[in-house]
Image: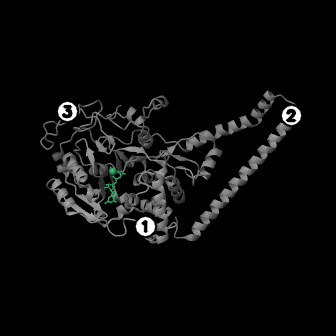
Amino acid sequence: MGYRGRASSYSYSSSSSSHHNQLRQHGTLLFLTFDLLARVGHILMLQFRRLRRHSAGLNSRRRLKQLLLKFGIPLLVLYLIDLPIYLYNTRVARPDQDLDQPFLTGCQDPAAYAAQTPRENATFVMLARNSEVDDARSTVENIEWQFNRWFHYPILFLNDVPWSEEFKDVLRRTVSNGTEVRFEVIEKGKWGFPEGMSEREKVKAKLSMKQQGERGVGYGGMESYHHMCRFYSGEFYNLEVLKPYKWYWRLEPNVRYACSLTYDPFAEMAKRGKVYGWTIALWEMGNTCPSLFKATNDFRAEKGLPRTSNWNALLKVMWWPAPIRWLLGFLSPVIEVHDSSGRKWNTCHYWSNFEIASLDFFRGREYQEYFRYLDSKGGFYSERWGDAPVHTLAVHMLLPPEKIHHFSDIGYEHDTLWQCPGNAPMDRQLLGNKALGNTGKMTPPSEGGTGCRCKCNENRRRRNINSECTAYLTAPVAHNRASWWQWWNGQHHYAVNNPHNPR
Ligand SMILES: Nc1nc2c(ncn2[C@@H]2O[C@H](COP(=O)(O)OP(=O)(O)O)[C@@H](O)[C@H]2O)c(=O)[nH]1
Ligand SMILES: [Mg+2]
């Protein structure tokens, strides 16, 4: 799709001469690659013919031996040289110490904490539909009880259509005394197709969404879902109502926090220089965003951004020899989740319905340029790029590992996914604390637990964090990692060696 995401603020495709230069360079590179392949093929063919002539009188065993000597061994040697170089270039360097740990363990006295700690410029945000009033109420009731009755951060509700009186009434009644609520309609130009997209391109986009629906791409046939993903990927950060704030905490209808959170995560993130906080990581379905990784890597290369450990943590390490990788790179426009050098994305990403993050980062120049670049590729509609993988790829491309924080001590449930930490020892549960009060029956503490009065649903497995996907994304901050043997047996480093998160 050729539309330009807001040409005025977008510099990549506004200059057609640089675009032509790029095309020319790409064409030259392709020509040289083909030329090289053709020459190598020609030499191999000549060698093969010679061998056939020479071995005409030999029996088949000796022929095979000759073939192995002439081709097999040189190819194996080349592979053995290529493989370590490839592995070295895609390695995730091991830090000297663990770079990310839970901020605090067990319960704090929330009244004392709030009195001593200056508040941050922060807000909760919930995008919702009027019809989701019950689910929105349930989330707000829960977060007020588990956290906000002590901290009173404002809650901002966003909608693409005017709020119903019912929604406003119910939610106003749900918050605790002292919590400010605001109901806003998303300002013009921030929801829907990008400004500057022509009618023809919109028709094309709609047709593409219809086809995605028919192909069974998750939410692919739902136009409003595409708008939602594009909104949360970029336009959200430029809303006027968010200008006064430095931090946001994203909420969604029908979310349950399973533990009390007795410290201020905004203040702790600010204190420790964190930028992005998450709870759950999971695999993305490749068919929703087949070319997102390629587009992101193209952006990275165009901008001269290095392949860091954080970037490499996004890769699925493959053992293919170089020519197969070149072929995969060449075919990347038509195969899923590969970049143009043939590297493969592991599709692991942070689930963005929980996020505590810096608005300054996302409204900053680098992220916004990335968003506009993606917009110019059209993938929010020609595919169904989700805001979760977009945020993850950006965070791993633009931030060093220590700026990302896993809130492994937060109990979080939404839909079918959840994270529930073990509870810290009883002496860290502050049972007589007046501000915490009676929070009901809690799950018994477990060794190395970090949680404050968590009530985990015992019918589910206790923790989700011992997963391969989490291990990929947390590798850059993990000093202690699982051995090959442990990995093979399904034990991944984040759980194996993090003293706060035993299996
Ligand atoms: N106002 C509004 N909110 C929407 C729309 N589509 C999705 N949302 C909100 O966007 C968030 C994510 O949508 P959801 O359906 O939960 O997506 P999922 O979590 O990926 O299954 C939720 O907070 C929804 O309330 C829409 O068309 N209008
Ligand atoms: Mg949801």
The residue positioned 32% from the left and 45% from the top of the image is: 415
User: Residue 204, image x and y in percent?
Assistant: 49, 65
Amino acid type, label 3: Asp
Name the residue carrying label 3: 427
Residue 56's disc is 2
User: Residue 7, image x and y in percent?
Assistant: 47, 70
Q: Which residue is more in the foreground, 287 or 104?
A: 287
Q: Is residue 411 left or right of residue 491?
A: left
In the rendered image, which quarter contains the C terminus? top left
Could you classify mark 3 by the number of other residues whose Cα lies within 10 Å: few (under 14), some (14-19), or many (20 or more)?
Answer: few
Is the Cβ of the residue at disc 3 closer than 8 Å to that at disc 1? Answer: no
Mark nearer the viewer, 2 or 3: 2
Amino acid type, label 2: Ala
Q: Marks 2 and 1, how far apart in space?
A: 68 Å
The image's colour scheme reads: one colour
The residue positioned 54% from the left and 44% from the top of the image is: 90
- The image quadrant where one finds ligand 1 is bottom left
Could you classify mark 2 by the number of other residues whose Cα lies within 10 Å: few (under 14), some (14-19), or many (20 or more)?
Answer: few
